[in-house]
Amino acid sequence: MARIDYIVLVAYFLMLVVIGFIGYMKIKSSADFYTAGGKLPWWLSGVSHHVSGYSGAVFVAYAGVAYTHGFTLYIWWALGIALSMILTTFYIAPRWARLRSKRSIQSPTEYLAARYNLPTQQVMAWFGVVIKVFDVGAKWAAIGVLLHAFTGISFVGGIAIAGTVTLVYITLGGLWADVWNDFASFFIQLVAGCTMFVMILIQLGDGVHGIFSMWDRLPPEHSHIFNDPYTPLFVCAIMVIYFFSYGGGTWHLATRFMSASSGTEARKAAVLSTLLYLIWPLILFFPMFAAPIFIKNLAEPTQSYSLMAMKFLPPGLVGLLLASMFANTLSMTSADANTISAVITRDILPFLFKRLTQFNAKKMLMVARITTLIFILITIVVAIRSQSFGGVLGLIIAWFSALIGPISIPMILGLLPAFKRCGSVAALASIFGGLLAFVYLKLFMHATLGMEVATPIFTSLILYVVVGLSFGKKANPEVEEMLTSLNNDN
């Protein structure tokens, strides 16, 4: 990169530190640290939900998919999320906000003790924390790949830089720092992405018509909706996963809805996030789809977007684009760190150490910051060892996507009155059944990608519904009252 690109990147890092200190001034308690005190505006919550739903992995792992498989990426990723968010908008997002306002919860798993029981909550909390270690590790690995491609910094060095910056601003500013970084990163991404889109159109030479004529210069299968291994089975499975994941099964996305002031405001946030997923990736992914035209026979497809940027963007804008990739990754990893810290601090540690329940607000805030720090350090270690888990794409799809279903199904369906008879037995059967299905596929079968992703989520879903509705007892009055109270804001 040119010197001006490094200046832009350093300026972005400094902005993050400033955001962290601004957030620090707004935080007086763990409720402020984890849920912004329920004062998050709907537009900020919506943008944050969208931006923190993906990371630099989009510009690495998914760029590789776009290079090798084409338009199917938009179908199973962006469009899949947008369609799954329709149900979330009407049935799930408002209930998260009402949980916080009516039950005073600060973590997504906090309500599970009342909904099921304490052992079930502990199993889900521990299981979820382990899953997120792999997911966040993939995001650090992605930013390590990007930094190496742009600057030549070693893979480990890139991870260390990104991790250090995140440690500073998230441990200081909590959720407030996180959502303002999301907003800033989306603005940066908007400028960089639109510029990249226009530059590629100019290079194609057909004007606006190049958006459509480009596909004639690519392999025919690149314009297909489904392109093996991204089969209809895979797409159906991944959409079910997206419903549970983006509805709050991915815990930091639940906090975006929880932090809204009311269920109505949370619904507005979900609508905004849905529209962004539907429209923005068409512009963002365009250079990725066009990459095979300009860079042929690339040995490492995950570097396609980075190489396109350095090939066509002028000095300064390369740094801005890298800053936008950084911003996405850091917003998602910091969001995860913040939410996982909430689960550990609010749900796991008080179970292990009863004295924590007597801590005042100042001491609990200190515990929150310490757990955030430790979680980030562990995920950095996983990132450095990412090749042991199948690389960035392997961590995201084969590990996180396959394992998120078993933990998220009892959490999301547990919010709905229709499943009030599904108690702790159904929840535990769902979790362990999905986990065993994943282990069986990994150890004893050479399954297709569609099977690997579909089997755990559908096993968990079937077990939760069948066990709960067939053998579940009548819900106790406390659970009935809680679920009924989530129907409206009053």
Image (cartoon, rainbow, N blue to C red):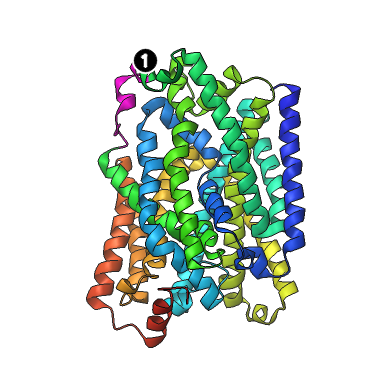
| Residue at the spot of label 1 | 217
**Amino acid type of the residue that numbered disc 1 sits on in the rendered structure:** Arg
**Depth check: 48 or 442 in front?**
48
Q: Quadrant of the N terminus?
A: top right
Whether residue 64 is situated above or below residue 220 in the rendered picture: below
- Who's the residue at 41% across and 63% down the image? 92
Q: Is residue 451 left or right of residue 70?
A: left
- Who's the residue at 62% across and 69% down the image? 345
Whether residue 73 is situated above or below residue 476 in the rendered picture: above
Q: Quadrant of residue 29?
A: bottom right
**Depth check: 46 or 17 in front?**
46
**Depth check: 137 or 169 in front?**
169
Query: Would residue 117 be visible to someone looking at this image?
Result: no
Look at the numbered disc 1 and give the secondary structure of its residue.
helix
- Who's the residue at 39% across and 26% down the image? 68
Residue 328 in percent (x, y) is at 58, 42
Q: What stretch is highlighted in magenta?
A: 215-230
**Depth check: 100 or 357 in front?**
100
Residue 126 in percent (x, y) is at 51, 65
